[in-house]
Image: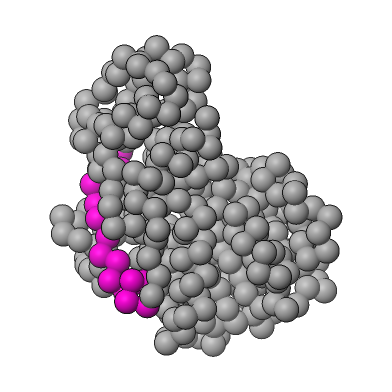
Amino acid sequence: METYLILGGAGFIGSHFCDYIIDLGQKVVCFDDLSLGKIENIQHLIGNPSFNFIKSDVNDINDEDKLKGYEINTVVHLAANSDIAKSHSNPDIDIKNTLNSTLSILKFMRNNGIKKIIFASSSAIYGEHFSKIHEDIGPLFPHSHYGAAKLASEAFISSFCENYQITSWIIRFPNVIGDRTTHGVIFDFVNKIKNDPTKLDVLGDGQQDKPYIHVLELVDGIMYFYNNYKHHKVNYVNIGVDTSTTVIRIIEILKEVFEINPKINFSGGSKGWIGDIPKFHYDLSKIHDLGWRASLTSDEAVYKTLKSLK
């Protein structure tokens, strides 16, 4: 039986990851400061002998003894500032919560002889490209502080792998949606129409077109890659869906699911916010050739998410 240390384990993706690992019959140490995560996301796991929760900041992981006694086999690093727009006014958010959190856990791994890390990276590292984005495309010039911090994190993971015999699995994924989501266009729309179902204010012109993957499929894809691709010290992959969904299409599905017909007010411009990449599409040949493929289309993932949020 292996023990997984899941950083950000009470968050949106992290809590689903905890569920997945527990269902495999493995052990989980969930590490989260609850600044973005919620105890409700993991409440059903508390009391399970294979699950332990530690409330603490990842940046303090080397300053305390809370993890002593745990024989950790694999680190799953999901802790980060997950709101790209938020750090526009304060770049230090991504320095502290996205980049420094990675450095902190890498130092912890080096000091404690832990040799395996799964890292949640992002499509944001790529910047803007007008062809399908494959893993080796370049140059990489992120448009957001979040993307820059994720790219820098990848670089430090690479150097730590080379210097301290660590093996990494870097997962670059697009927009993730599903139950327990905490931010993003769907979360924003649902909150707005619950407050006033007669109108909907939309950032951008509605033509933003992106792939949306359901969180349960993302976690399954991550673990599939982790278990089936072990060729290098640094293993990296795009995980996503073949299709994409425009903001206008999200609004159509929202109206259908919630049975409403709000007045739509577009703010204009092609971007939802500064740092946003309004359109991109992944080349998923690497993960598909390995044998994994998402079962839900982007539109189906949107529909399933809206149904669960309703």
Residue, x 38% and y 65% (percent of image)? 293
Asked if one can make out residue 111 in the rendered structure from this viewpoint, the answer is: no
Residue 84 within the magenta-colored segment of the rendering: no
248 to the left or right of 30: left
Colour option used: one colour
Q: Is residue 76 above or below residue 161?
A: above
Q: Residue at x 47, y 40 (%)?
A: 305
Task: Name the residue located 59 percent from the left edge and 59 percent from the top edge.
Answer: 17
Residue 169: x percent and y percent? 47, 74
Q: Is residue 43 left or right of residue 89?
A: right
Q: Is residue 193 above or below residue 207?
A: above
Q: Quadrant of residue 77?
A: bottom right
Q: Position of residue 177 (x, y in %)?
A: 46, 45
Q: Which residue is nearer to you in this view: 42 or 35?
A: 42
Name the image quarter holding the N terminus: bottom right
Residue 39, position in %: x, y? 71, 44
Q: Main secondary structure of the magenta part?
A: loop
Inspect the magenta stretch and tell me whether residue 287 lies in it. yes
Q: Nearer the viewer, residue 117 or 86?
A: 117
Q: Which residues are magenta?
A: 274-290
